[in-house]
Image (tube, rainbow, N blue to C red):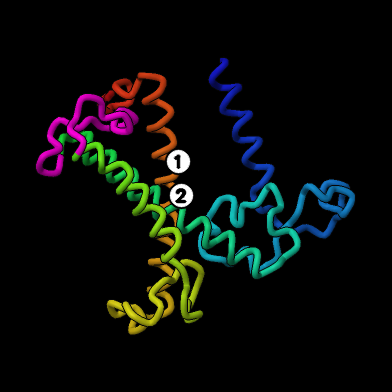
């Protein structure tokens, strides 16, 4: 009974943000007297990443001012975080499977990798090297030439791999795949980190460091 009530509550809260069909009757629930129930413009509803059943999901109204510049900035931030999260999930699963670089066979994985107690200084030196890599990626992974075709496009006129030769439909599909995989990876690495600290990764089928 408790599970049924919880599921019903979650379904009700999700439905509150789902796009609804237009009707001819105006009520207090969809009038301007409720600014918290902001309805995105049609252009936002058609943006890449707006997927069913919620469509364009912005319950906090971060782009309520409908500033395209602000939207592009937030989308770029989302893509960058998604890319880092995909690398994080891949790296965690790889090291959890026991894969190591030569000379680092004894290095732990998970949060314990930040300590590396008892390991040679050469191995511990990978931590500041990793932090420097993150810094360089943050500083230099930018649209330096102003030639980006969309938020997150960092080719800067140097790398293409045949992207421009593809159709718009193909490009949009690939961009949507990257965006949604990044969203899933952000939730995934956050869940792994939380369950690792709780000490119950084994309960969800992952090895506990």
Could you say whether the residue bearing mark 1 is in a helix, strand or loop?
helix
Query: Residue visible at 39% across and 59% down?
Result: 137
Query: Residue visible at 85% across and 55% down?
Result: 25
Nearer to me, 163 or 51: 163
Nearer to me, 167 or 154: 154
Q: Quadrant of residue 109?
A: top left
Residue beneath disc 1? 187
Residue 39's label in the rendered image is: none
Q: Residues within 10 Å of mark 2 (few under 14, many from 20)?
A: some
Label 2 – label 1 distance at C-alpha: 7 Å
Query: Is the stretch drawn in magenta largely helix, strand or loop?
Result: loop
Residue beneath disc 2? 183
Residue projecting furthest to the bottom:
165
Query: Residue visible at 73% across and 57% down?
Result: 39
Mark 2 in CB contact with mark 1 (< 8 angstroms): yes
Query: Residue visible at 59% across and 56% down?
Result: 55
Answer left or right for 26 relative to 115: right
Q: Which residues are magenta?
A: 100-121
Q: Position of residue 114 (x, y in %)?
A: 33, 33
Could you say whether the residue bearing mark 2 is in a helix, strand or loop?
helix
């Amino acid at each position: 009974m408790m599970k049924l009530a919880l599921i019903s509550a979650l379904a009700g809260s999700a439905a509150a943000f789902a796009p609804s069909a237009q009707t001819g009757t105006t009520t207090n629930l969809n009038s301007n007297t409720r600014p918290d129930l902001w309805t995105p413009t049609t252009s936002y509803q058609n943006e890449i990443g707006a997927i069913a059943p919620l469509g364009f999901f912005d319950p906090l109204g971060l782009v309520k001012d409908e500033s395209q510049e602000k939207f592009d900035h937030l989308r770029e931030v989302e893509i960058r975080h998604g890319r880092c999260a995909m690398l994080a999930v891949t790296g965690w699963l790889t090291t959890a499977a026991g894969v190591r670089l030569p000379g680092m066979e004894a290095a732990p994985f998970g949060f314990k990798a930040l300590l590396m107690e008892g390991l040679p200084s050469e191995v511990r030196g990978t931590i500041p090297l990793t932090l420097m890599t993150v810094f360089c990626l943050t500083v230099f992974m930018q649209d330096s030439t102003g030639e980006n075709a969309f938020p997150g496009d960092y080719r800067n006129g140097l790398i293409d791999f045949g992207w421009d030769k593809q159709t718009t439909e193909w490009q949009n599909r690939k961009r949507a795949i990257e965006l949604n995989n990044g969203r899933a990876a952000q939730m995934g690495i956050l869940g792994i980190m939380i369950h690792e600290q709780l000490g119950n990764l084994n309960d969800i089928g992952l090895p506990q460091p």
